[in-house]
Image: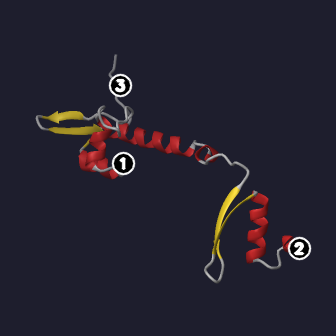
């Protein structure tokens, strides 16, 4: 039976290339590999020994990790990152004289007030 080879050659890349590909610094890369670190990432590709004192990473594994990170960051619904609204808005304003007012209002009131404060032709200016 004939041996099958991958369509693209497997390349080992060194640390500086991993840094360039990922945008991470050297210390961060090694933190991601260290289970004792708060930055540990079990999905980050493990290095491969390429000599007595040299390591590298499989380029395809680094690329796959980057693609997963991109997919994860773009699949997070925007509203999960925002705090839930409590139905009121806090507003700190400063008038022309420099006086500061700090108010808590319903969102509709804030929108109407902002509208009238900046646009006298706004329909809600009454």
Residue lying farthest to the top in this orientation: 1
Determine which of the numbered discs, if any, sits on residue 3 in the image. none
Residue where numbered disc 1 is placed: 22
Task: Tell us which disc is closer to us: 3 or 1.
Answer: 1
Q: Quadrant of the C terminus?
A: bottom right
Where residue 33 sits: x, y (%)?
30, 36
Pick whichever, 24 or 120, lies toward us: 120
Instruction: Please tell me which residue lies in front, 46 or 99.
Output: 99
| Dot label at residue 4 | 3
Which circle's residue, 3 or 2, is located before the other in the chain? Answer: 3
Quarter holding the N terminus is top left
Q: Is residue 55 above or below residue 95?
A: above
Which residue is label 2 attached to?
126
> In which image quadrant can residue 10 be found?
top left
- Identify the residue at image location x=80%, y=79%: 120
Q: Residues within 10 Å of mark 1 (few under 14, many from 20)?
A: some
Residue appearing at x 36%, y 52% in the figure: 23
- Tell me where residue 49 appears, x and y as whole percent: 19, 33
* Picture coordinates of residue 30, whole percent (x, y): 27, 41
- In front of the other: 120 or 17: 120
Please tell me whether mark 3 sits on a helix, a strand or a loop: loop
Secondary structure at numbered mark 1: helix
Residue 100 picture location, percent across and down? 62, 73
State how many labels appear.
Answer: 3
Q: Does the CB distance between marks 3 and 2 fall below 8 Å?
A: no
With 1 as the anchor, is 47 left or right in this view?
Answer: left
Q: Nearer the viewer, mark 3 or mark 2?
A: 2
Tell me which label, 3 or 1, sits earlier in the chain.
3
- Give me the residue at 11% from left, 34% from top: 52
């Amino acid at each position: 039976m004939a041996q099958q080879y991958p369509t693209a050659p497997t390349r080992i890349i060194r640390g500086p290339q991993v840094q360039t590909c990922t945008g991470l610094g050297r210390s961060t890369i090694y933190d991601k590999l260290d289970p004792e670190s708060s930055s540990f990432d079990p999905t980050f590709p493990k290095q491969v020994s390429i000599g007595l004192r040299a390591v590298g990473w499989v380029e395809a594994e680094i690329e796959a990790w980057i693609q997963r990170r991109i997919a994860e960051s773009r699949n997070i619904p925007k509203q999960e990152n925002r705090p839930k609204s409590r139905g009121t808005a806090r507003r700190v304003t400063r008038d022309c004289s420099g006086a500061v007012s700090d108010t808590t209002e319903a969102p509709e009131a804030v929108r109407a007030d902002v509208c009238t404060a900046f646009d006298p032709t706004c329909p809600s200016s009454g």
